[in-house]
Image (cartoon, rainbow, N blue to C red):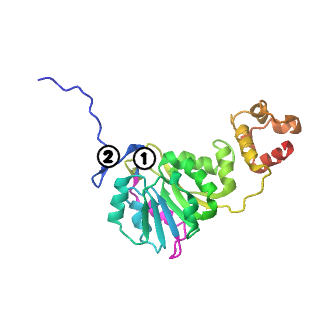
Amino acid sequence: MKKDYRPQVPQAPRAHGIALKKQFGQHFLRDQHVIDNMLDHVQITNQTSIFEIGCGDGFLTKFLLQTPVKQLWIFEIDHDWATYVQKEYADPRMTIFEENILDVDFARFEQDQPWTLCANLPYQITMPLLNLLQKNRLFLREGVIMIQEEVAQKLTQTSGRGYGFISLYFQHYFELKLLNKIHPDAFFPPPKVFSRLVYFKPNQNPEYIEREEQFWKWIKLCFHQPRRTLRNNLSHTHYDLSRIPEAILQLRAQQMSKADLVNVWKLLI
């Protein structure tokens, strides 16, 4: 009898009889302590509007609906899970949108603002979503999101390794706080990396920076190669480096605070 040497195709993990879809980054939370930590850091009353991104099988949704929340909007791109949660956790306060949050016009959030976000995010949309939240922060009160540990560290660094454009940019627009670090075993299926809960609150009146759009482009240039000095990173740009003291040009951007960099920017414009 001949042996069958054809490679076996691994079966996708399933929950509640539904296959999890790798392309959507589906890793479902299974630790209630993580939910408790998330909800302990946001204020939820019968006047609070919350939105969730990627409800999956509703593990977080269930606990959100146990609070006195006024309304819960859910954005779930997967029809199977949207249907499951709608049936399993039917509640007049809950509305499910089968939409990609990155394609949503945030003008709809004008009603019942400000909104609170609670979400276990698919890792692949973290940075696009943060940019979307920054542009629409006027609609937001606060939130807690689950993201990859490495990204969480970059967001909150104030110097040294990992500190860079992402740190400066998002700390300018948000108050950010690291909460619990989450082991992969808290999820099904477990991801290959650690996760982190991050609390955020929009800064509705950030410090004024002259020619701000150009400033952030310049910051990217300053951190282009983080281990290189400002002079080396800026030497091939159109900026007149003769306006900057040599001692500063010999520093790396990683050695400078936002205030330091803003002061250098003022010398150039």
The answer for how far apart the CA atoms under marks 2 and 1 are is: 13 Å
* 71 versus 226 height, above or below: below
Q: Which residues are magenta?
A: 28-48
Comparing 193 with 268, the one in front is 268
Verify whether residue 221 appears in magenta: no
Q: Give the quadrant of the C terminus.
A: top right
Could you tell me which residue is drawn at 27 percent across and 29 percent down?
7
Could you tell me which residue is drawn at 52 percent across and 51 percent down?
102
Q: Residues within 10 Å of mark 2 (few under 14, many from 20)?
A: few
User: Under tag 1, what secondary structure?
Assistant: helix
Q: Position of residue 93 (x, y in %)?
A: 43, 71
Q: Mark 1 belongs to which amino acid?
A: Phe
Residue wearing tag 1: 24
Specify the quadrant of the image occupied by residue 81.
bottom left
Q: Mark 2 belongs to which amino acid?
A: Pro
- As drawn, which residue projects farthest toward the bottom? 46
Comparing 64 with 85, the one in front is 85
